[in-house]
Amino acid sequence: MYEGIYAPPTAARYLLAACAADRAYPVTSRHLIRWIRKGLAHPDLADVPGRDLTIAFHDLVSMRVIAALRAAGVTWPRIHAAETWLRRHTGQQRPFATEQLWTDHSDVLSDFGDRLIAASRHGQLAMSIVKDYLIPVSGLRFTDQIAASWSPQPGVVLDPAVQFGEPCIQHTRIPTSALASLIRGGDPPDLVARSYGITPEELTSALRWEQKIAA
């Protein structure tokens, strides 16, 4: 099965571009490498030399979850506690890519069976009524209990089964980078949109995303 493979600098640009401006966490490739060395991606990556280090799509999703939790104010001890508890009790090497998570700015919460638990508090039971007041780690679509795609902004999707995980226009196989390249080369936006059978709004979304990751 083909899936996305990303170098840390590329992954960091995607994560930083996806952060909301009012609660952004300043992700860099150094952050990602540090998280990987601490075992927060697949454990097999922890000792891979930096020059050879690449991450798969589900590692990227795990990093996305961590960045979102940090942006929401969750502390490192709580993130580590949640990852450790979920890995132990789900048997998954990348639990942040297999569990739908929420936060209240302090804890990391997850559905576990038919219960809502605080994974950052060693699985302490939480009242399900509080879910309406929690912040979801959004932008992820799950299939068969694993993240199947990530939408870092409206209209743009990373799917490991489409174009090797490159950012594409939603519901298409059109990489946003291809569209931006044509515009930079001088092609008129209306011609590009017609040629690819997309709307002007979809083209605008793709170009906005490419501008973010180039910043």
Image (tube, grey):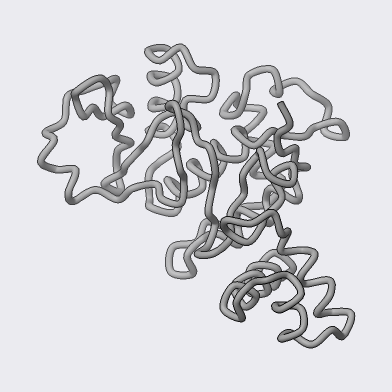
* Residue 57 horizontal/vertical position (percent): 64, 37
* Residue 123 horizontal/vertical position (percent): 26, 21
Question: What residue is at 26 percent from the left and 29 percent from the top?
Answer: 118
Determine whether, in the image, residue 78 is placed left or right of residue 5.
Answer: left
Camera-side residue of 93 and 169: 169
Residue 18 quadrant? bottom right
Question: What residue is at 23 percent from the left and 27 percent from the top?
Answer: 117
Q: Is 178 situated above or below 132?
A: below
Determine whether, in the image, residue 206 is placed left or right of residue 140.
Answer: right
Question: What residue is at 29 percent from the left and 20 percent from the top?
Answer: 122
* Residue 74 horizontal/vertical position (percent): 38, 44
Determine whether, in the image, residue 51 is placed left or right of residue 150.
Answer: right
Q: Is 48 situated above or below 107?
A: above
Question: From the image, which quarter does the C terminus lie in?
Answer: bottom right
Q: Is 1 situated above or below 199?
A: above
Question: What residue is at 40 percent from the left and 41 percent from the top?
Answer: 75
Determine whether, in the image, residue 65 is placed left or right of residue 32.
Answer: left
Residue 181 quadrant? bottom right
Q: How many tags in the picture? A: 0
* Residue 97 horizontal/vertical position (percent): 50, 32
Q: Is 126 situated above or below 74?
A: above
Question: From the image, which quarter does the N terminus lie in?
Answer: top right
